[in-house]
Image: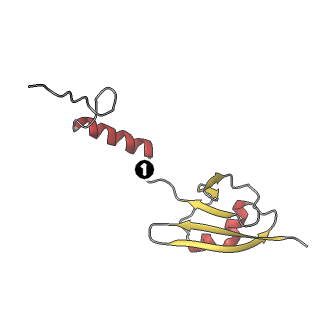
Amino acid sequence: MTKMIDIEVVYGTPKSQSLLAVSVEENTTVTDAIVLSGILQLHPEIDIATSKVGIWNKTVRPSVMLKQNDRIEIYRPLIADPKEVRRRRAEKAVEEGRADKVTGGRPNRAKTKD
């Protein structure tokens, strides 16, 4: 007899979240558990081939075997690259005089003596 384990599969969008409790066989992979959970029918926008997944907020490969009480998280793709957003924000700060053009830090505003 195959031992069953209890896991959760979660996915969220800005408008809805799904948390499904599922019992699967002990040697089930992350990918297999996602398919067995039925979450792909609830959220057809999930592309299991390209979506990043994690267990308890740590990214894992889809081939990882699950353990009792694991929580599989399916991550949505980023809308904007965080490095690009940071670069644009820094450029804007330089243009507005809120940052030094060379160092990127706060501009040196020497106090003038009267």
Can I make out residue 49 in this image? Answer: no
Q: The residue tagged with tag 1: helix, strand or loop? A: loop
Q: Is residue 97 depicted above or below 112 in this figure?
A: below
Residue 74 vs 89, above or below: the answer is: below
Q: In front here: 50 or 80?
A: 80
- Camera-nearest residue between 72 and 57: 57
**Count of all numbered marks drawn on residues in the image:** 1
Q: Is residue 10 left or right of residue 16?
A: right
Q: Quadrant of the C terminus?
A: top left
* Left or right: 11 as drawn, with respect to 103: right
**Residue extending farthest right:** 1
The quadrant where residue 95 appears:
top left
* Res 21 visible: yes
**Measured along the vertical axis of the image, is residue 112 above or below residue 32?**
above
Residue at left offset 33%, top offset 38%: 90
Instruction: Report crowding for label 1: few under 14, some 14 to 19, many 20 or more residues within 10 A (C-alpha).
Output: few
User: Residue 94 in the image: x percent, y percent?
Assistant: 27, 35
Residue receiving disc 1: 80
Question: Furthest residue to the left?
Answer: 114
Residue at horizontal 38%, vertical 45%? Answer: 85
**Residue at left offset 61%, top offset 69%:** 40
Residue 21 is situated, as x and y percent measured from the top left of the image, at: 67, 74
> The disc labelled 1 sits on which kind of residue?
Ala
Q: What residue do we see at 69% from left, 55% from top?
A: 62
Q: Residue furthest front?
A: 114
